[in-house]
Amino acid sequence: MLYKVNEVFETIQGEGSFTGVPAIFVRLQGCPVGCSWCDTKHTWSINPDLNITLDAVMVKSAETEQWAAVSAEQILALFKAKGYQARHVVITGGEPCMYDLHPLCDLLHDAGYQSQIETSGTFEILAPLQSWVTVSPKVNMKGGYKVLQSALDRANEIKHPVAMDKHIEQLLQLLHRTDTSAKLIYLQPISQQTKATALAIAYCKKHNWRLSVQVHKYLGIE
């Protein structure tokens, strides 16, 4: 199994329940969902002409469409070569669930890491049960993909981007058919907009949900 890797870096997780936790991010290439507010649009396309080496990925400008096709073993070896100390690995994208994540996550777990998957919920989640799954459901996006019930059921946390009341209505429709008794529910204001933040706070208080504020963007880090 080869993974198309756009970025690998060590930072602090800035969103959801692991906010503040040192983390290694593995950003995979490819996403057909088409979110209008996406801040990683450079990960959408899988252009074979942009396939480069993993060494080249590590020194390229972060926001380019170039990627490297590498194995789980190569990814783990990179962590060790770079001297990364974090034990929490965030697999993101793009849309990481376009890939079978079992080989990568199993290897990470065997090596003493914990894994977190950040997904739109529009693809089946192929990952071990011990992987923490964050579903940020993308509803009615340009790509026409539907949020899968199986993804919502698998989620450990549901982190919903919001900017207006209709986004809350969409989330409530999704949660209506989902058992959330063991799940964490977060609202995340889109682009830290003032009105979106106020809206998210109001609905968090109304439904006893949680607020995710993208701390990394306030800190000016990746």
Image: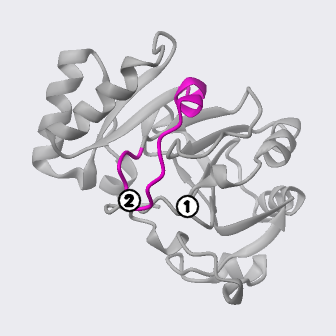
Q: Considering only order in the chain, which callout, 1 or 2, is on the residue closer to the N terminus?
A: 2
Q: Amino acid at mark 2?
A: Cys
The magenta-colored residue range is 138-156
How many numbered marks have been drawn onto this rendered protein structure?
2
Residue that label 1 marks: 94
124 or 164: nearer the eye?
A: 124
Q: Position of residue 80 (x, y in %)?
A: 82, 58
Corner quadrant of residue 175:
top left
Q: Position of residue 13 (x, y in %)?
A: 50, 45
Q: Residue 33: which disc? A: none
Residue 144 counted in the magenta span: yes
> Would residue 152 be found to the left or right of residue 83 on screen?
left
Whether residue 146 is visible, yes or no, is yes
Q: Position of residue 137 (x, y in %)?
A: 43, 41
Q: Amino acid at mark 1?
A: Gly
Categorize mark 2 by other alpha carbons within 10 Å: few (<14), some (14-19), many (20+).
some
Residue 94 counted in the magenta span: no
Q: Residue 35: which disc? A: 2
